[in-house]
Amino acid sequence: MTNKKQFSDEWGVILGGSSGFGFATLEKLANHGMNIAVLYRETAVRDRAFKETLKKIASDAQVTILPYNMNALDLSQRHSFIRELSSVLGKQPLIRLLMHSIARGNLKPLLELSSEDISLTSHAMSNSILEWAKDLYAEGLFAPAAGIIGLTSEGAWRYWEGYAAVSIAKSSLESLSRYMAVELGKWGLRTNVIQAGVTRTPSLERIPDSERMLAWSKERNPLGRLTTPADVAAAVYLLCTKEAAWINGALLHVDGGEHCI
């Protein structure tokens, strides 16, 4: 399927795209002509409804959206997906964006965390972005000056109850992204991280005392409201444009200035 929109014939791969930031980005980029391969985990019932939603978005935007209800952290499933997508793309370098929006971690008090809890959370929310980038590059699927985007949070450096394992993972992601910006930059790839403000998403609602966090964030935000998934999707869109080609290794605050207070 072709169109004449901004990202016509280009592709995005979104890891974790059934809700929150990932889904908002899918909608935003599809409306600008980008084809999307979206990976997510849902029950069979929710999967059917989600696929119908994707069909409508694809039809309205005149793009292709390929849904994959699979475990993005499983090595064999990742390789199977990449082989299939490579076939769809005709082994051409058409991927403009790899967005890592996987929210899978242990939310326990620090003293209840095991080494395995921390390791699994770090793999899900940090290390796996490098594994995906390396495999997509090895398959020759990245477009020139393609972007890799991860998501971090204020919890990487500020105490949030029950957030220790995720904080460790997010801090690791920020460090990893800087090394990726340098070493993958030699391949023509750009790696950046977005720190969104506190946002009402299904992931946030699993954090203990999230309602208090939301109320406090709205009160202190200089622009007087909470961050929305659409705000983050708009930033991802900007990083996909040609005008953003010189942005690499950045941590972009998308929070209305919330981090300043």
Image (spheres, grey):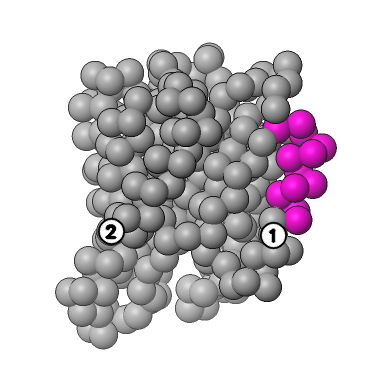
Where residue 150 appears, as percent x and y from the top left, is 41, 43
What element does badge 2 sit on? helix
Where residue 116 appears, as percent x and y from the top left, is 21, 74
Quarter of the figure with the N terminus: top right
- Relative placement, left or right, of 240 versus 100 is right
Q: Is residue 226 magenta?
A: no
The residue tagged 1 is 50
Q: Give the residues drawn in magenta, as a range.
A: 52-63
Residue at position x 28%, y 42% in the image: 130
The residue tagged 2 is 123
* Figure check: 116 above or below 100: below
Residue at position x 82%, y 37% in the image: 60
Question: Which of 85/4 is in front?
Answer: 85
Question: Which of 103/37 is in front?
Answer: 37
Q: Tell me which amino acid carries mark 1.
A: Phe
Where residue 9 appears, as percent x and y from the top left, is 61, 22
Residue at position x 59%, y 31% in the image: 237
Q: Quadrant of residue 201?
A: bottom right
